[in-house]
Image: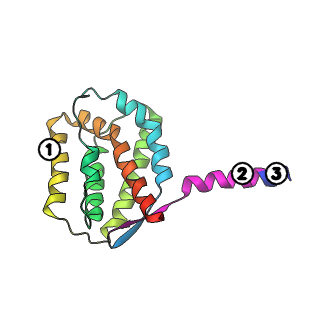
Amino acid sequence: MKMLLSLLLLLGCLSELVQSRTLQLDSCSVNVHTHELRKYYSTIRSNAIAGDSEVGVKLLEKSLIKDVQDGQTCCFMRLVLRFYVERVFGNYAPSQPQDQRCSSSLANAFVSIRRDIHKCHCQCSEDTQRKVDSLHAEFIKLEINQAAQKAVGELDTVLEWLEGLGQKTLR
C-alpha cells in the first residue's frame, strides 16, 4: 500500500513538470510547458540578475507586453521568441555547468514553441514590429554578452506573460 501511494505521489509530481498549457494565440493555438520553462529559469535567474551590471537599463518593459494589440499576440510571441533564440541564448555564457544546461534547455524549449508558432502564419502590424524593434534597439546599445545577460535576467517578464496567456485560455 505504501509503495502504491509513493508511486502515485511520484507520478503526480512528474505530471506537474510535463504539464502543458494550450495557449490561444489569435486564430492559432500552441502547447507550452510553462512549468518546465519556469523550472529551468528559476535555476539560472539569480546568477543572470547578479551578473547584470547595467541596472539602469531595461530591455523588456512590462508595458510593452501588456499593450499588445488584439490580433497581434501570435506575432508578438513569434518575434520575442525569435529575438531570444537568435540574439540572446547564443550570446549568453553562464559560468556554472548547471546554468549552461538550463539555459540550453530553455533555448530548446523556445525553439520548439517557435516551430509550432511558425505553422500559424501570424500577420504582424507595424506597431507590433516597432515594439520588437525597440527591444532590439536597446539590446544593441549594450555589449553583446552584457545585453544577453540582461535579456536572460528579464525572462521573468516573458514567462509571466506566457502564464497569463495560459490563464486566459483556461477561462
The disc placed on residue 9 is 2
Density class for disc 1 (Cα within 10 Å; few <14, some 14-19, many ≥20) is: few
Would you say the magenta stretch is mainly helix, strand or loop? helix
Which mark sits nearer the N-terminus, 2 or 1? 2
Residue 3 tag number: 3
**Residue 95 in view in this figure:** no
Q: Earlier in the sequence, mark 3 or mark 2?
A: 3
Q: Is residue 21 visible?
A: yes
Read off the magenta span: 6-26
Q: Horizontal placement of 122 versus 4: left or right?
A: left
Q: Amino acid at mark 3?
A: Met
Horizontal arrangement in the rendering, residue 118 relative to residue 134 (left or right): right
The residue type indicated by label 1 comes to Ala
Q: What residue do we see at 32% from left, 45% from top?
A: 89
Q: Secondary structure at mark 2?
A: helix
> How does the figure colour the protein chain or chains?
rainbow
* Left or right, residue 84 beside residue 101: left
Crowdedness of circle 3 by 10 Å Cα count: few (<14), some, many (20+)? Answer: few
Residue 16 place in picture, x, y as percent: 58, 54
Measured in 3D between alpha carbons, the distance from the residue under mark 3 to the one under mark 2, in whole angstroms, is 10 Å
Residue at 19% across / 33% down in the picture? 143
Q: Position of residue 80 (x, y in %)?
A: 27, 53
Q: Picture coordinates of residue 48 (x, y %)?
A: 36, 33
User: Which amino acid lies under the numbered mark 2 shown in the image of this protein?
Assistant: Leu
Distance between mark 2 and mark 1 Cα atoms: 48 Å
Q: Which residue is mark 1?
A: 137
Mark 1 or mark 3: name the one nearer the start of the chain: 3
Q: Is residue 8 above or below residue 24?
A: above
Q: Nearer the viewer, mark 3 or mark 2?
A: 2
The numbered dot on residue 69 is none
